[in-house]
Amino acid sequence: MAITSPANRLWWKEPIHRVELIWIVIAFLWGLAMFFTMVYWHAIGEQNLANTTYKITPAAFSAKAERMAEQYKVRDELGIPVVRPPPGGDVYLLGRIWMWWPILELEKGQSYRIHLSAMEYSHGFSLQPVNINIQVQPGYEHVFTMTPTDTGQFSILCNEYCGFGHHTMASPLYVVESGAARSPQE
């Protein structure tokens, strides 16, 4: 019920004022512009990550990650293995309670198939500052191809609240020049 009743009880038959009509047209045109921009960026933009998802048990994925870590380990960092898988290979990264395991060392300009899964809780894989974001669920294996274009140390953060240790769930990702070997002191 309005404070004052409209002059005509059939409010939808009231005339639209010019200023109101201008705002309706602006809002409609803005909505169309946003819709077509989203369609354009989805079809043409390179920011969309193409990934595939498979069902897998957490134990089976953990076994794959452990085999890869044993095979390609180059050193330990704070008790976590640092692995350097071959270019073009499959890389397994496991979200465990408040850590990404193992630490990855990739080569610049080389492509890798990254496999992600979680052991117990839902985690968010956020590669910064590249801004790759994937919600990682236990029981699912997310696979995407990544080609690092810059060298340096990047951060893998969890951006899905996963419990009281969530704020500590960060891992480095190293990208080195092709053929370069990192020493344990680096």
Image: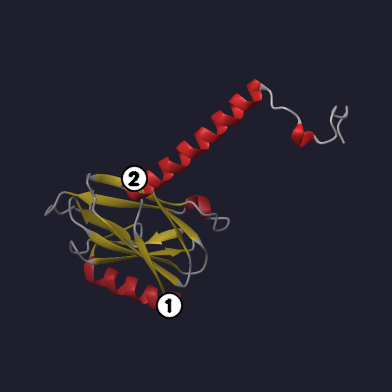
Q: Amino acid at mark 2?
A: Val
Q: Secondary structure at mark 2?
A: loop
Q: Nearer the viewer, residue 179 or 182?
A: 179
Question: Which residue occupies 72% across, 27% down?
Answer: 15
Question: Which residue occupies 13% across, 52% down?
Answer: 180
Q: Amino acid at mark 1?
A: Ala
- Res. 83 visible in picture: no
Q: Is residue 101 left or right of residue 183?
A: right
The numbered disc on residue 59 is: 1
Instruction: Name the front one of labels 1 and 2.
Output: 2
Q: Nearer the viewer, residue 25 or 85?
A: 25
| Residue 85 in which image quadrant | bottom left
Q: Nearer the viewer, residue 9 or 120?
A: 9
Q: Is residue 115 left or right of residue 84?
A: right
The quarter of the picture where the N terminus appears is top right
The numbered disc on residue 130 is: 2
Mark 1 Cα within 10 Å, few/some/many (few <14, many 20+)? Answer: few
